[in-house]
């Protein structure tokens, strides 16, 4: 399950869910505030090298020239990179990138060597000139790569669609493709706006994202944004981030719809027969839906597929326009 890995990695507070993985201008819709500063500069018309940017850990990262041997240590950056640069410039991607359960770019990463993320020597062996990692990466790996003189940029926030857009812009600048990054973000926003317009007349059912781990998606998660952009109201919006909830709390929340990722679909059948939940509207009306795992937990531009998937199930009578991600 992609969220088994991504939640644990992208949001370190979710160590209990350790099985997830997962910049353009922030938008008011997504409810997040993209960080500002050198690292948060919006995609400009061009990137002049050398450049120095400050990553999400506060570390200054200098890139002397346009990187041609890029290593990606997170699935989110896998998916962003393959839309920004040709495969010839990507030396390593993560092991998860080729698994369709977790990844939306399995076809696009064919032929690129894979990296587990915990072996600095493997990364250094491809002579990288830029390594993209997340703050959950083993610090000894980051230190070893940096000690070899290789710039490492660490990300630590993929908790909203706004931050995904922000990170796309940052990566675009790092690799010398800010205009492509801007186009990806604009296309995302166009897709989302079309979905929002299509579902607007149909009201906002309350939606709970709940998994077999016992966690619900609250405010400050990409899923919260997905639900809202898909025309729903997050039943757990009063919670902060990913929070564990009980059957009694689910009864009080009384969501109209319950969603879970597709690789956890068996859990929805268990919920449907749970005696303690028979009064819950979603259970009573059989509105329990499995959403494609890679789409629902995406921390890249492919998050728009999650918005589409959720909109289709919570608004079955709406003519939701299909989305096509730029690649």
Image (cartoon, rainbow, N blue to C red):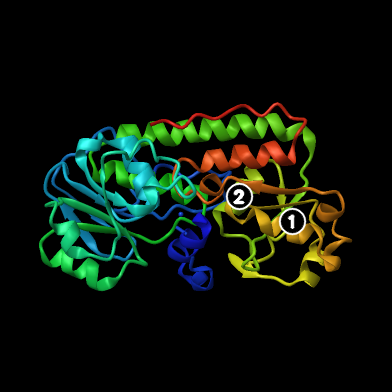
Residue visible at 57% across and 51% down in the picture: 31
Give residue 14's mark: none
Q: Residue 307 location in percent, x, y? A: 60, 41
Relative to 144, is 205 on the left or the right? right
Q: Residue 299 location in percent, x, y? A: 46, 50
Identify the residue position indicated by label 1 in the image: 269
Q: Secondary structure at mark 2?
A: helix
The quarter of the picture where residue 67 lies is top left
Depth check: give the residue in front, 291 or 231: 291
In this rendering, is residue 251 above or below 31?
below
Q: Secondary structure at mark 1?
A: helix
Residue visible at 73% across and 72% down in the picture: 246
Q: Residue 3 location in percent, x, y? A: 52, 58
Residue visible at 41% across and 55% down in the picture: 35
Assess disc 1: are there few (<14), some (14-19) or many (≥20) residues with their C-alpha within 10 Å of its C-alpha.
some
The quarter of the picture where residue 215 lies is bottom right
Residue visible at 27% across and 72% down in the picture: 139
Label 1 and label 2: CA atoms lie apart by: 12 Å
Identify the residue position indicated by label 2 in the image: 262
């Amino acid at each position: 399950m992609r969220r088994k890995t991504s939640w644990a990695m992208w949001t370190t507070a979710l160590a209990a869910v350790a099985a997830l993985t997962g910049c353009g201008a922030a938008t008011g819709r997504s409810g997040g505030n993209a960080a500002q500063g050198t690292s948060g500069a919006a995609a400009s018309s061009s990137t002049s090298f050398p450049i120095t940017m400050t990553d999400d850990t506060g570390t200054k990262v200098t890139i002397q020239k346009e990187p041609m041997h890029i290593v990606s240590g997170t699935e989110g950056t896998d998916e962003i990179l393959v839309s920004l640069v040709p495969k010839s410039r990507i030396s390593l991607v993560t092991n998860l990138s080729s698994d369709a359960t977790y990844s939306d770019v399995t076809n696009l990463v064919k032929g690129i060597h894979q990296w587990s993320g915990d072996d600095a020597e493997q990364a250094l062996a491809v002579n990288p000139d830029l390594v993209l990692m997340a703050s959950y990466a083993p610090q000894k790996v980051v230190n070893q790569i940096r000690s070899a003189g290789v710039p490492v940029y660490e990300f630590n926030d993929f908790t909203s669609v706004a931050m995904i857009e922000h990170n796309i812009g940052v990566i675009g600048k790092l690799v010398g493709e800010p205009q492509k990054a801007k186009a990806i973000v604009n296309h995302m926003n166009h897709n989302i706006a079309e979905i929002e317009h299509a579902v607007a007349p149909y009201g906002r059912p309350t939606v709970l994202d709940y998994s077999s781990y016992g966690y619900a998606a609250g405010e400050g998660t990409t899923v919260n944004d997905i639900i809202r952009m898909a025309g729903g109201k997050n039943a757990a919006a009063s919670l902060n981030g990913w929070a564990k909830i009980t059957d009694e709390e689910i009864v009080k929340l009384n969501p109209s719809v319950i969603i879970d990722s597709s690789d956890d679909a068996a859990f929805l059948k268990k919920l449907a027969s749970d005696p303690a939940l028979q009064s819950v509207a979603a259970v009573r009306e059989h509105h329990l839906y499995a959403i494609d795992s890679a789409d629902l937990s995406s921390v890249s531009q492919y998050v728009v597929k999650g918005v589409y998937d959720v909109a289709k199930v919570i608004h079955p009578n709406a003519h939701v326009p299909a989305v096509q991600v730029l690649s």
